Amino acid sequence: SKDSQQLLIKLLKWAMWINRVLELKSLSMKRFKRMIFGSKTEKTKKDKNNDDDDKPSDAGNSPKNKKAKKKNGNGRTSSAKYSVASDVDHKHESLSSGDSCPECNKGHLYNLSPSIIITFQGNQPITSKKNSVERLRCSGCGYVFTASAAEELRKNQYNESVSTALALMRYGMGLPSKRLEEFQKIMGVPISDSMQWKLLEDAASPIFPIYLSLKRFAANADLLHHDDTYLKILDLMKENKEMTAKQRKGMHTTAFVAVKDKIKASIFISGRNHAGENLLDILEERSSEKGKIITMSDALSRGMPKDLDAEICNCLSHARRKFIELIDMNISVRESKHMKKWLGVIYYNDTKAKEKNLTDHERLEYHQKFS
């Protein structure tokens, strides 16, 4: 009927519109799911229906399916890994080395290597002690005499280890200060988030020159990876409320990984600047004798300023992931699968190049020949 026909046309148009929106939007449902549930493997699955025409026939090397070698070990953590565990010796209650064997009465006992049993004890990140300092008051003049320990205790109320624990929990493990404050409160050792921040700032100030040294190391490195991620900065969020629509309101953390002579250094810069702007800021300290640096990032324009003088490389993993998204959205499936197989050859060749311990230049020539 005409009514059913009109309804069906509307449904088809809506389905086509939804599909088009997913194609055009930078955030596909696949990426949205990956953000929520985490990423799964992107390895190519065997497809019996694939045509032989899709296979790269003239590649120098092609991936071969190999059975994964069974890993050694029983899944337990070695006792040697517990490097800071305190050692406690437990002697046998009634026997010692040299005694006659109570089982056979023939041989004598001698020492074997001890059996190591690791025991665990729960504790909060920050602990405390109540120091009771004696005070005496004169009944005549009222003068108070306090034990000399009080001055030293007040001066070192927060041990250096507290700042270390806070830094590891916040920046190493990503635990917010407010959450740590609540945890410490539950454990009976309250420490406010504002006090945590003060202790971290006091600890950071003396080591700030190290941060500047790391930036100089990055500026003169052979290879520099960089990428942006979003964050919230309370001071900048307050500023945003008073800013106009045309003013920049974004907040970013640019992560750098500098590589030089097999040494890696990680640097994080937070603020309104994008990765490309932070990259130029770091490279201002590059020595003129060093020549061009190699940069590695995704292909976003804000990560690559126009006036950058460098050997620019773009991330192949990002490129490959886009073809996988097209396959998942059932768009250009045949072409995308063909590209994915070609990219697989490159990854395979790179693995072989690394197994042969080729230099960077030899590795490039290897790829130019076979990839």
Image: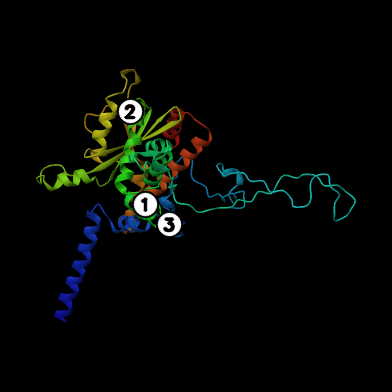
Kindly identify which numbered label has been placed on residue 105: none
Q: Which SS class for mark 2?
A: helix
Residue that carries the numbered disc 2 in the rendered image: 212
Gap in angstroms between the C-alphas marked 1 and 3: 62 Å
Quadrant showing the N terminus: bottom left
Sequence-wise first label, 3 or 2 = 3
Quadrant showing the C terminus: top left
Residue 62 picture location, percent across and down: 48, 44
Q: Is residue 199 left or right of residue 102?
A: left
Residue at the location (43% across, 57% down)?
Answer: 50
Nearer mark to the viewer, of 2 and 1: 1
Under mark 3, the amino acid is Asn
- Can you say whether 5 is above or below 182 in the image? below
Residue that carries the numbered disc 1 in the rendered image: 190
Gap in angstroms between the C-alphas marked 2 and 1: 34 Å
Q: Are marks 2 and 1 in contact (CB under 8 Å)?
A: no
Farthest-out residue, top:
289
Farthest-out residue, bottom:
1
Q: Residues within 10 Å of mark 2 (few under 14, many from 20)?
A: few
Residue that carries the numbered disc 3 in the rendered image: 50
Q: Residues within 10 Å of mark 3 (few under 14, many from 20)?
A: few
Residue 338 picture location, percent across and down: 38, 50
Is residue 267 visible from the viewing direction of this image?
A: no
Under mark 1, the amino acid is Pro
Under mark 2, the amino acid is Leu
Q: Which SS class for mark 1?
A: loop
How many marks are shown on the rendered structure?
3
Q: Residues within 10 Å of mark 1 (few under 14, many from 20)?
A: some
Nearer mark to the viewer, of 1 and 3: 1
Gap in angstroms between the C-alphas marked 3 and 2: 54 Å
| Residue 302: quarter of image | top left
Is residue 312 visible from the viewing direction of this image?
A: yes
